Amino acid sequence: MHETLERWGSQRAFILAVTGAAVGLGNIWRFPYITGENGGAAFLLLYVGFVALLGLPVMMAEIMIGRAGRRSPMQSLLQLANQAGATPHWRWLGWFGGVTVFLILSFYSVVSGWSIEYLVEALNGDFVGSSPAEVGANFEAFLADPLRMTFNHTIFLLLTLSVVAAGVANGLEKLNNLMMPLLYLLLLVLVGYASTTDGFGTALVWLFRPDLSAVTPVVVMHAMGHAFFTLAVGACALMAYGAYMPDHQSLPRAALAVAALDVAVALLAGIAIFSVVFSQGIDPGEGPGLMFVTLPIAFAELPWGQLWLGLFFLLLLMATWTSSINLAEPMVAGLQGIGLKRGQAAALVGVAVWLVGLLSVFSFSSLAEVHWIAGMNFFELVTTVPTEYFLPLGGLLIAIFAAWVVPRDIALRALDAGPTGYRVWRTVVRYVSIPLTLVVLFSTLI
């Protein structure tokens, strides 16, 4: 594959695109409930620290590889390995990343379909007057209905692959330029509404006044793992975005802007959600059901709750849409690298992901008791292994390749941070980020 000629139209477009890739379920679904389970402000403080020491340097490494190679992830890795005189087997890291994003997108599309269902139900006022038991039963009934689940899964994939098929400038860039400012506007509107609730002050104290006695080894590990997960690193997806990066743009400044915007989404979502939760006297440690069971109950009891809940699920749908495009892009770019046209590659990826996604759909009904590994059904397996094992392993290998294999002059030019900035980045990746990633990986395995 020759060097890609596609580029983001501006530095702003690149930052919005990578932010759109990073912002998703991890910020709006996972961050609130994992913060709730791990003590609030103490977890938040650790999470921000690990974003700086772990997530940000590895994200820079991944983007740098794509920018230096200007090809699909697999081809970029192969070219840089050849230039370094290293084994060409490094290219299989791109294949491993493709498998990772394929598996993640297969369940991501299914879960994102839930936000479509809830957006419609919220706007219809279906949660108004419902008891907690009724809301929970409604969610269980939806999960057990494979036709409704498949319909939403299909709609979401069509939304995703139609944008990817349109290309970098006409698809990805235009969507992110529209969606990301709108997403932040919606978040600010929701926070503005949250400030009028009784739980706003309590939420701020709980999120921003750390109780260091709440810090345990488990809390530290969860903060480390979430910092890695939230920036969408480890699957070579950001390599594809890096290949389209403008020639004259400081990668560290762009990556820092992305990290700041990503953390801002998590914080704003946390303020909005926990203000509502505390105003209704609900336990913030409700776990993964916080989004689809607890919040509808809480919003339904508030003035104009139907409207605000609808806006919230619109926000969730927008965030997952931009993230899913990031998951699909490296697979499409890889297929383009072997000669397929972009539209053909997008269609092939879409059909394959849709078919595998059906296994997740039926994991809540006819395949619920079919256990694949360690007593897990397919949905449990595909939401655990790629995110908790494959992403840290991919991130570790990306960091090693970027900091130890890529020739210094190539990395220095692609990073565009000057000799001092390059040395600082390389030192942090080699002696901080790589050891921390090993800790994440081994703690997960243990």
Image (cartoon, rainbow, N blue to C red):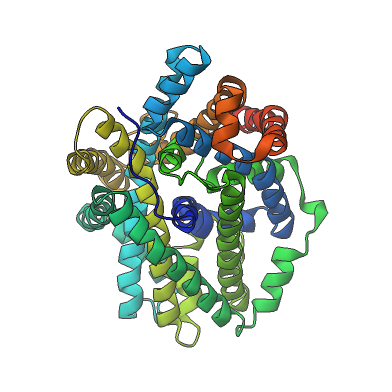
* Residue 251 position in % (x across, y down): 57, 44
Quick check: 228 above or below 337? below
Query: Seen in the image, is 179 located left or right of residue 195?
Result: left
The reply to whether residue 132 is in sight is: no
Residue under the point 28% across and 38% down: 332
Farthest-out residue, right: 213
**Is the C terminus in the top left, top right, bottom left or bottom right quadrant?**
top right
The reply to whether residue 204 is in sight is: yes
Residue under the point 26% across and 51% down: 157
Quadrant housing residue 279: bottom right
Give the camera-side residue of 401 and 278. Answer: 401
* Residue 333 position in % (x across, y down): 31, 37
Quick check: 339 above or below 158? above
**Is the N terminus in the top left, top right, bottom left or bottom right quadrant?**
top left
* Residue 351 position in % (x across, y down): 19, 41
Query: Seen in the image, is 231 located left or right of residue 125?
Result: right
* Residue 408 position in % (x across, y down): 61, 24
Quick check: 148 above or below 217? below
Give the camera-side residue of 148 and 365. Answer: 148
Farthest-out residue, front: 248
Give the camera-side residue of 58 and 155. Answer: 58
Q: How many marks are shown on the rendered structure?
A: 0
Quadrant housing residue 182: bottom left
Query: Seen in the image, is 139 located left or right of residue 25?
Result: left
Give the camera-side residue of 206 and 376. Answer: 206
Residue under the point 33% across and 40% down: 5
